Amino acid sequence: MHDSVATVAGRNAQRSTMRLEHLITQAALGKVAGRNAQRSTMRLDKHGDWHEVGALRFEAETRGVHGVTTIIDAETGEVLGDDGRMTVYEPRENELALRTDAELVALSEAALEYTIAELDGLELEDAPKTRAKVQALEKLITAHMRSKEAKLEAANNLTEARLRIERHMGALIPRLQKAGMLNTYGGDRKSRSDALTLISSLTDYAITRNESSTWQKLARIESTLFEDYIATGKENLWELSTAGLLWYARQQAMAEPDDAPPLPDGIFRVIYADPPWLYTAEQHGKGSDQYSKIGQDTVLATHYPSMPTEAICALPVKDIAADDAVLFIWTTSPKLFETADVIKAWGFTYKASIVWDKVKHNVGHYVSVRHEFLLIATRGSCLPDSRTLHDSVISIERTEHSVKPAYFRELIDEMYTPQGNDRIELFARGDLPDGWQGWGNE
């Protein structure tokens, strides 16, 4: 009898608690008209205590699903209700117009928090879809925001979420390939025994070669360096990006004292240089979608480490230059006047220039750029050996990024006849012809 009474009492207490929780939840989900649609709700913490917090209610209406709701702390962006990632990543667009910038920032923080929480369990087959949702949410949210500062904050939260997903995929891909569970490309089938085993490929997940390569580069960046980029970028109001992260990692690597090899021994009559100039946002179209506001032309920086002009000037080139020597140095319009400082620091005097017409256009801030300059400077007396005067404008269609046509090295050999190993290429890329020494990272 006593047991039955206790059981009934327990059930009544449980029903009472459930009713209380239901009322609290309904209060949290109650609609409030107007732009400042901030709700009050009660939250049960890990100690069993209830607290009133400002909360936001976001609903999803995707693929025929209605009424799925996520409750988000209006101040911290913390996800209070756990109704699935769909509501975090895919809110109803028609309700976003009613939100304040602060509320939309909170939604971006919630999406970032959810991404971090779910990342370890995210499979390769789902990761590209989640990444696409994060990108779509960024466009959706920022389109409804008014403040530039709030828009940058929300965009950076979602870019951080995307970068974390890309790093996660970049770590997964080689692991799965090594385990024989993923082919690099194509949709091959492999037979490991009598049974035919079907192995997935990158194309099955709509992942391109370039994406796979870039994400694996991101994954190889040390976690401490990645977190430092995120924190530093947000603190300094940078526009976070994949290219910006790669640039940041390269700049940090360049800061290592043993990273740059010393200039080779020897004295050279001909010096050919293609410095990796460091560009500011102003020099390459500040505000352009193709460039990060990190203050660096990150498109260029994804190809090779860049150096500030002061660092290029500091290279002891004058120590390897003959008393009578010639310098051929590449530069661009934004760096034209700074190149004069380099020429002087290396012990040379400007004499003439060659214009390379690249045929294809590049992005520019004032004009559509399709040329580069090859400046000629001398030390002592070093006129060309050949009396042939070559055209100062050369039209050759550009190919890979920053790769200069072999024609210009051949032109130098025609102007200055090789005499043993009397010529060197600084910041060299790839194999060099006989008679040339190379120095650089590639």
Image: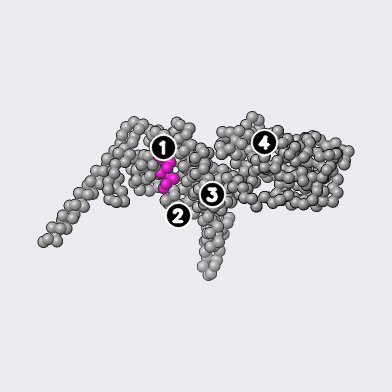
Question: How packed is label 4: few (under 14 Cα within 10 Å), some, or many (20 or more)?
Answer: some
Where residue 104 is drawn, which disc sits there?
A: 1
Q: Cα distance, mark 2 to mark 4? A: 43 Å
Q: Cα distance, mark 3 to mark 2? A: 20 Å
Amino acid carrying mark 2 in the image: Asp
Q: Is residue 62 left or right of residue 321?
A: left
Q: Nearer the viewer, mark 1 or mark 4?
A: 1
Task: Identify the image quadrant of the N terminus.
Answer: bottom left
Q: Cα distance, mark 1 to mark 2? A: 26 Å
Tell me whether the residue at label 1 lies in contact with that at label 2, contact meaning CB atoms closer than 8 angstroms.
Answer: no
Q: Cα distance, mark 3 to mark 1? A: 28 Å
Tell me whether the residue at label 3 lies in contact with that at label 4, contact meaning CB atoms closer than 8 angstroms.
Answer: no
Whichever of labels 3 and 2 marks the residue nearer the N terminus, that label is 2
Q: Position of residue 122 (x, y in %)?
A: 45, 53
Residue that numbered label 3 is attached to: 225
Where residue 361 is drawn, which disc sits there?
A: 4
Whichever of labels 3 and 1 marks the residue nearer the N terminus, that label is 1
Whichever of labels 1 and 4 marks the residue nearer the N terminus, that label is 1
Q: Please report the residue visible at 29 percent of the width from the left and 51 percent of the height from the top.
A: 47
Q: Secondary structure at mark 2?
A: helix
